[in-house]
Amino acid sequence: MTGGSYDVAIVGAGYVGVPLAQTFADAGNRVLLIDVVSELVDALNRGISHIEDVPSSALEPHVSSGRIVATTDYEQAKHAHAVLIALPTPLTKQREPDLTYVERAAQALAPVLQRGQVIVLESTTYPGTTREVVQPILESGSGLKAGVDFHLAMSPERVDPGRTDWTTKTTPKVVGGIDAASTEAAAAVYRKAVDTVHEVSTPEAAELTKLLENIFRSVNIALVNELAQLCDRMDIDVWEVINAAATKPFGFMPFQPGPGLGGHCIPLDPYYLSWKAREFDFSTRFIELAGEVNNNMPYFCRSVISQALNHGLKRSVSGSKILILGVAYKADIGDCRETPATKLVELLQKAGADVSYHDPHVPAFEGLRSVELEPEAYDCVAIVTAHSAVDYGDIVKRAKVVVDFRNATKGHEIDGKVWKL
Ligand code: SAJ
């Protein structure tokens, strides 16, 4: 280990960086957690966590023992054997990769880069980012050479916020370096804290691995979303069909239709690959088609609501009181990033509906506040995200009309009252 007092420095105290810091600290490593938001750093140094997956009770002991130190000072990274960059990689308005955060971090790290250090990019990005974007910034800013003076690798984050069956420690970690020595050095860093490390030959392979994982989900979700629209026309219960197909013990993996794709990964990551593929005169048709199908779901859901009001109450959407039940991007969390609820609320308001929402995890959303759950006060209750805290049988009993986009009312269906995808 190069001189210095930290086993790892982690850049980015977010939903990836804080669990990563805890995982390394739990394994006895000294961790430096770097973030540009000083309020966050101050709170972390008081043992206060802002990340749901890492309660303050798990963080505090590491802070008081000095095992985890937070700072806004990139200079401190020179005291770390390895530096793991876990920063957001959003899209621009034109749906193109936005590497600003990663580039800024590399520019801040370059002047303090030390011989023998191991630098790893964890952010989800297109194949080539580590070698074509991060490496030149680190080399030009330090005068050091990757693969000669320092190791450079890519290891995609696989954090699923809210999940408890797989953690940062137990989820296998893929690692790919710009050369064999970098792969080995980076793998050795992760083996200090993560149970399983899977080595690949290049950072490009590691970058594409993560994109494949998420594109796989986006395409398969689009498949069942397309099927849901066909089943609506054929009067077949798409949920029954998927559940039946899921009885096949091999060669099938069930996905569920829904009001569209939300979250900070699945809706965005595929566009990182389609953007890069264009450089190779290649069009990633599955990605584009999946995006079209998934992005159309809020529009389809609006028409399902319109049909339910029409047939159930002889009412139009215009002038109807509609309660959206659940607006977070997925069940049992409060994250609303890219949630399809945003587009659906907008479409219903444009159609003249009086839209309210109730979400036990989301107190405020799109200028609205979560209302008390009184189904009878509305013409229609639309289940957009099915949090487990809600009693859907009671909703069906009390509501005039229920539109269920998540099969949450399974077993409570009442003809003429409950409409489903
Ligand atoms: N969704 C469906 N139908 C499905 C599954 C999901 O409509 O069958 C929707 C969800 O409602 C949500 C969106 O897709 O709006 C994304 O859901 P997700 O289950 O993929 O959850 P995410 O976005 O939190 O994805 C994360 C990803 N983790 C990382 O990127 C590290 C993904 O790779 C994981 O596979 C996923 O969690 C997971 O398995 O839960």
Image (cartoon, rainbow, N blue to C red):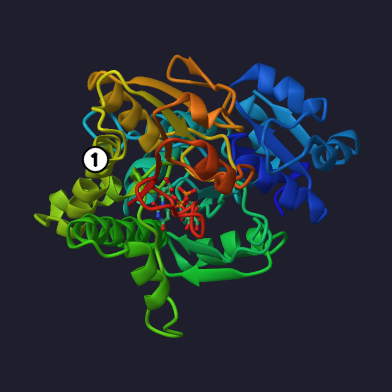
**In the displayed structure, does residue 40 sit left or right of residue 12?**
right
**In the displayed structure, does residue 167 sit left or right of residue 341?**
right
Q: Position of residue 168 (x, y in %)?
A: 64, 55
Instruction: Give the residue drawn at x 65%, y 35%.
Output: 77
The answer to whether 396 is drawn above or below residue 108 in the figure is below
Residue 204 visible in this rendered orientation of the protein = no
The answer to whether 198 is drawn above or below residue 339 in the figure is below
How many marks the image carries: the answer is 1
Q: Position of residue 379 (x, y in %)?
A: 39, 28
Q: Position of residue 406 (x, y in %)?
A: 43, 51
The answer to whether 196 is drawn above or below residue 415 in the figure is below
Give whichever of 97, 399 is nearer the camera.
399
Residue 352 visible in this rendered orientation of the protein = yes
Indicate the amino acid at tag 1. Gln
Instruction: Give the residue drawn at x 48%, y 26%.
Output: 357
Dot 1 corresponds to which residue? 307
